Image (cartoon, rainbow, N blue to C red):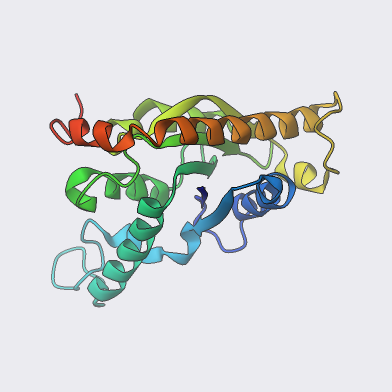
Amino acid sequence: MNILLVSSSQRNDSNSFAVAKYLQTNILNDMQGVESSIVDLSRYPFLLDYYGIGRDGTGETGTGRDDSAALADNKDDVLTQLYGCDAVVFIAPEWGGMIPPALVNLLLLTANGSANGLPLGHKPAFAIGVSASGGGSNPISLLKGYAAKNSHLTWIPLHAIVQNVDDFLAQEWAPQLNNNLSQVQSRLLVGLKSLVIYAEQLAGVREELVTLSKVHPFGQ
């Protein structure tokens, strides 16, 4: 089973990427029969050009560069990883109360028309909000509010919010304790264990469900 971690920050060496590595080190690497990989959106800058900005330089919004080949490579690489996973974890930083635009574009790319199918259709998803201070709840609300409409992913009812992320990453792994940071660790542990169970149970019916979803792929 392959769990795909989406580090949604557009910044290099972001805290979101550090959280993804933290999850691999402390949880996923110890799960029998589970493999994990990370999609770091900071490595795919051309996904932001999907709706025409900067692609050829000929329009009013052009930048004088031709990014169409790089865009195609970015899109194909990311979609291959999305199609190949059994479950997905979105690690989303809160930027001014919102999620990064690259994550919005990634979700748009998972629609049937853009992806030539439904790469996340009826695959379980776990949302994690990240904040350098006391935020992090808005990414959860935004993702669960609209991300499933055209992607047809399946949110599990659990989520986690990592606040004061620098302090969290420096915390010793001890999810059995009752302090605040350890309880966040416990939520992450329970969430990922639940995600694996959902993925196992949905695997046998996913193909049939995706076929049904393609009848009305754009939701209502």
At x 72% / y 39%, what residue is drawn?
A: 164
The residue lying toward the viewer, choosing from 49 and 81, is: 81
Q: In this view, does 34 lie to the left or right of 151?
A: right
Q: Answer whether residue 152 is visible to the viewer in this image.
A: yes
The residue lying toward the viewer, choosing from 50 and 5, is: 5
Q: In this view, does 62 lie to the left or right of 124?
A: left
At x 33% / y 35%, what residue is drawn?
A: 206
| Residue 208, picture quadrant | top left
Q: On screen, 157 above or below 41?
A: above
Tell me residue 19's x, y (percent).
Answer: 65, 48
Tell me residue 27's x, y (percent).
Answer: 70, 44
At x 57% / y 36%, what residue is drawn?
A: 129
Q: On screen, 132 above or below 176?
A: below
Q: On screen, 37 above or below 1?
A: below
Q: In this view, does 149 lie to the left or right of 163?
A: left
Tell me residue 54's x, y (percent).
Answer: 26, 68
Please give the count of numbered marks on the rendered protein. 0
At x 44% / y 29%, what residue is drawn?
A: 155
Q: In this view, does 199 lie to the left or right of 19?
A: left
Q: Answer whether residue 142 is visible to the viewer in this image.
A: no
The residue lying toward the viewer, choosing from 124 and 55, is: 124
Tell me residue 161's x, y (percent).
Answer: 63, 32
Q: In which quarter of the image is the C terminus?
A: top left
